[in-house]
Image: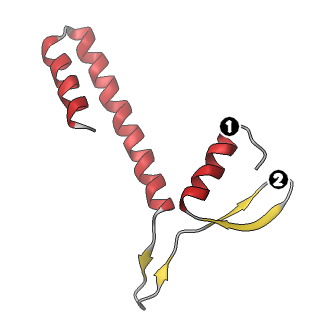
Amino acid sequence: MSELTQEGLDYFERAGDEGDKKYVAAIRDEIESLRCDAERYRYLRCGDKIDPNGYLELSQWNFVTQERNSGRLLFSAELDAAIDAAMNGANV
């Protein structure tokens, strides 16, 4: 969470009434949930690492649609674009 966001939430938590405090707590919970999802995605997307034998293991994904198996490997930004398109209903 950015410092500005943290400061704003802290302010409303201190200055607000009980309703504000519940609202701030719900926002903090939502931010934490989103952070966990983002970290999980980043781990899958950017999980490149060196294995014990010194080989680089790259995170790669084979993009498959219901209509066809393209057999195409996607990396990084290309993977993000395919996920975004699928989430927006595109038939990639």
The one nearer the camera, 50 or 18, is 50
Q: Is residue 22 above or below residue 88?
A: above
Q: Position of residue 17 (x, y in %)?
A: 19, 8
Assess disc 2: are there few (<14), some (14-19) or many (≥20) residues with their C-alpha within 10 Å of its C-alpha.
few
Tell me the quadrant of the picture where the N terminus can be found: top left
CA separation, marks 1 and 2? 16 Å
Callout 1: SS: loop
Q: Residue at the location (38% across, 31% down)?
A: 30
Question: Looking at numbered disc 1 in the image, what kind of residue is underneath it?
Answer: Asn
Q: Position of residue 39 (x, y in %)?
A: 40, 52
Residue bearing mark 1: 88
Question: Looking at numbered disc 2 in the image, what kind of residue is underneath it?
Answer: Gln
Direction right: furthest residue: 67
Q: Residue at the location (70% across, 60% down)?
A: 63
Residue bearing mark 2: 66
Locate residue 23: give its quadrant. Answer: top left
Q: Is residue 54 above or below residue 62?
A: below
Circle on res. 22:
none
Assess disc 1: are there few (<14), some (14-19) or many (≥20) residues with their C-alpha within 10 Å of its C-alpha.
few
- Whichever of labels 1 and 2 marks the residue nearer the N terminus, that label is 2
Q: Position of residue 45 (x, y in %)?
A: 50, 60
- Horizontal relation, residue 81 to residue 46: left or right: right
Direction left: furthest residue: 14
